[in-house]
Image (cartoon, grey):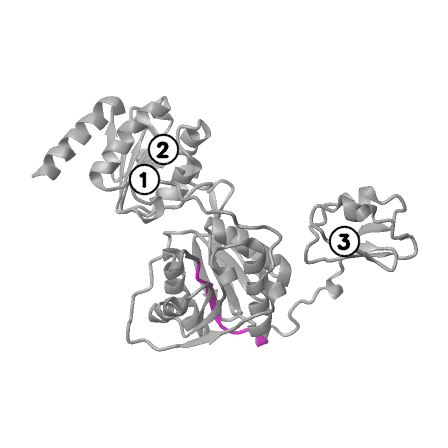
Amino acid sequence: MSIKIINEKCTGCKLCINSCPFSAIDVKNKKASIDLDKCTFCGACIEACKFDAIVLTKISPSEIDFPKKLEEHKDVWIFCEQKNGVVQSVAYELLGKGRELADTLGVDLCGVLLGENMKQSAQDIIHRGANKVYLVDSPKLKHYQDEPYSKVLSKLIKKYKPEIVLCGATSIGRSLISRVAIAIHAGLTADCTGLDIDKKERLLLQTRPAFGGNIMATIICPNHRPQMSTVRHKVMKEAEIDNHRRGKIIEDSFDEDTYFSRTKLLDIVEEIEETVNLTEADIIVSGGRGLQKPENFKMIEELAKILGGAVGASRAAVDSEWKTYSHQVGQTGKTVCPKIYIACGISGQIQHLVGMQSSKIIVAINKDPHAPIFSVATYGIVGDLFEILPELTKKFKEVLKK
């Protein structure tokens, strides 16, 4: 879909300028023009125009700058997400898998790092298996913002032509990579849990849950490059560190317009929790609808604190506003892979199981012996959680004091 000005009908009245919430329209010499980099095709200008001079149009395939020669695209790229100058662990997970994919294809594994004063982190990415790191270092990239990040990554892809681009399915990754896919006319498979290569066709086999997790779909993008995926956190093993590994850091920079953003970052407020980060935790204690009311989550929090773990929640508990969304485990929340996952009062619907079933040890506490959670549990306790949790907490306190 695109948008077009019919010059013969345009009078330069500027009604469209006043209607556009994205400042995408300008009028010069009594003729309007639209900046397609800013336009979201919302249609507000079409309704405002009294002369029917603005229309939505369909784009034919011949008008899109698709890659003409797929063989020109080489290498596997990993977008290495950073927060406050620290590369996030999901990037290291992708570097581990990316190394396998690159070796299968016989190409280089490359990291992409955007931020400020990130050269040492670029070296760390090489130590995790990358042959090259594309580094764009600018104060304007210190914190993530949609527009500058997506424009920089899009320009890097168009310039260096990777074959595959992978990104973590985090809040940043999901926001960024969808914009990039649209900008470069590439396909995108979201929330993958498995990746492989069809060596004969050089295709990325992208596997993800579908139909509520009831089936696993494998998706390919045979006609366009790069092949792009977001991958769930904690479903792949982190790349090992090799401090003797050598690689190349390729620094790039762009004009000021590339870093321009129509939004201004005022402040970053971190959520303060007494327990550890959910996606990084080795032990997670999760509560569900069986807790009956929000006050009862104190039992979950107390046990998690004693074990040095994190607090999780089912979607039902989050929808009831017993816990915030940042605690949600499942298909529409976070995917976790702790050493121990304790599910309290969670029935175990497929949407929840998708997010935690790869945990090494699963302990389920539920009064319903037929609850689906027991089908994946390593250990199951059938009983009243209001009796069991206090006893567990008491025992762990006694053991850990010794």
Which of these two is toward me, 315 or 152? Answer: 152
Cα distance in 3D space between marks 2 and 3: 55 Å
| Callout 2 touching callout 1 (CB < 8 Å) | yes
Q: Is residue 294 left or right of residue 38?
A: left
**Residue 246, position in %: x, y?**
35, 78
Measuring from the top left, give residue 233's x and y in whole percent.
40, 52
Mark 2 lies on a secondary structure that is helix
Residue for point 44% across, 28% down = 321
Query: Is mark 1 in CB contact (under 8 Å) with mark 3?
Result: no
Magenta region includes residue 56: no
Residue 92 appears left or right of 30: left
Disc 2 marks which amino acid?
Answer: Pro
Quadrant of image for the C terminus: top left
In the image, farthest residue toward the right: 8
Instruction: Read off the residue under disc 1.
Output: 376
| Residue type at tag 3 | Ile
- Whole-angstrom CA distance, mark 2 to mark 1, is 8 Å
Q: Which residue is mark 3?
A: 25
Q: Bin the neighbour count of mark 3 within 10 Å (Cα to Cα): few under 14, some 14-19, many 20 and up.
A: many
Which stretch appears magenta?
72-81
How crowded pointer 1 is (Cα within 10 Å; few <14, some 14-19, many 20+) is rated as some
Q: Position of residue 374 (x, y in %)?
A: 31, 34
Q: Please tell me whether residue 395 is drawn above or below residue 244 in the rendered image.
A: above
Disc 2 designates what residue? 372
Mark 1 and mark 3: span between their CA atoms? 56 Å
Q: How many numbered markers are drawn? A: 3
Helix, strand or loop at mark 1: loop
Q: Is residue 391 left or right of residue 350?
A: left
